[in-house]
Image (cartoon, helix red, strand yellow):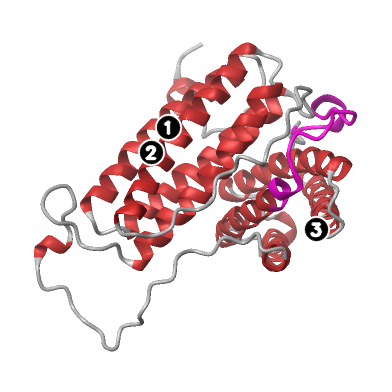
Amino acid sequence: METEKNIKLTSAELSQLWASYQNDSGSICVLKHFLKTVEDADIRPILEHALQLSQTHIQKLTSIFTKENYPLPKGFSEDQDLNVNAPCLFTDNYMLQFMKQMAQISLNAYSVSKSLSVRSDIDQFYGQCLAEVNDMDTTVKKILLEKGLYVRSPYIPPYPVKIDFVKKQNFLTGWFGERRPLLSLEITNLYANFQRNDLGTATLIGFSQVAKSQKVGQFFIRGKKIASKHNEIFGSILREDNLPVPMTSDTYVTESKISPFSDSLMLFIVTGLIALGGIGYYGTSISTSLRRDLTAHYDRFIHEILKYSEDGANILIDNGWLEEPPPIASDRDELAKKK
């Protein structure tokens, strides 16, 4: 009878473990730079705890790969991808907002990883990761609220006094004629996507200042323009319903031109934010928006950032920076060819 000891990792488990190793090894470099440059005594403990979690994850992931006799991913290292002497690139406020977004993205990512894990040790690992990031999310929000830096989504007064049902098809329209007011979930998506793009814009501005490669720097500038354009549209839709637009990120980036990170790590961070924070959340927004103009905007945005992401992947490939994910399925047609 098959026991837990001889159950191999599934393709789903391998893919999640490999991605976790990449993310945590990159996070260690980012967090060490933040800790070297942070000034706020309330933010430092959050960064220290996040660093300790990422380092512990790497130890556990290394143990899992080693026991499986599976090649350890290269990931990122302090020797090659971190300049410990670089001055501050981002402000303390940026670091706190960055931790907020990373906690939210990680909550989604670890939920998926746990749901895909069957072997008990992998399921337990991701269950623990999920509990850890849940606590982190709560802590970051608490500090943001205490400092008056948490930007809440809009209030919609008054509360309804009774339930109601949609009576006309024009509830779905949006391009022509009079548009109905935004639903609370549509406002939530617009507001959250604006905030994610705002932080992404700041990230791309900072990275474009310090990129060593001109091609990589131009790629970041292009991404900044895309994110800014999307936010102009999100903002105009919110303003149409007399709703507030979130604050901008003008004070997030310093004037440093010395890079704390390798170009490959910065590209990894940007492409990761595109995949998780851009395409993923835009897709969710499509599925939960009922006004046709909103779904059309999100659909167009997804195609635009998919092309942008592909161009980023090509830069990684051209420079030999893109580590190949876990082995693809066997090519049976190729194996069947006569020698």
Residue at the front extreme of this rendering: 242
Looking at the image, do the residues carrying marks 1 and 2 touch, with CB atoms under 8 Å apart? yes
**Residue at point 45%, 55% (across, down):** 191
Residue 44 relative to residue 170: left or right: right
**Residue at point 69%, 42% (across, down):** 23
- The image position of residue 31, as x and y in percent, is 80, 44
Q: Pointer 2: what residue? A: 302
Residue toward you, 198 or 70: 198
Residue 25 relative to residue 167: left or right: right
Q: Which residues are magenta?
A: 75-96
Report the amino acid beneath label 3: Ile
- The mark closer to the camera, 1 or 3, is 3
Tell me the crowding category of disc 2: few under 14, some 14 to 19, or many 20 or more residues within 10 angstroms, Cα based: some
Camera sees residue 4: yes
**Residue at point 55%, 21% (across, down):** 219
Q: Pointer 1: what residue? A: 306
Residue 92, magenta (yes or no): yes
Alpha-carbon distance for marks 1 and 3?
Answer: 33 Å
Residue toward you, 157 or 165: 157
Alpha-carbon distance for marks 1 and 2?
Answer: 6 Å
Q: Pointer 3: what residue? A: 46
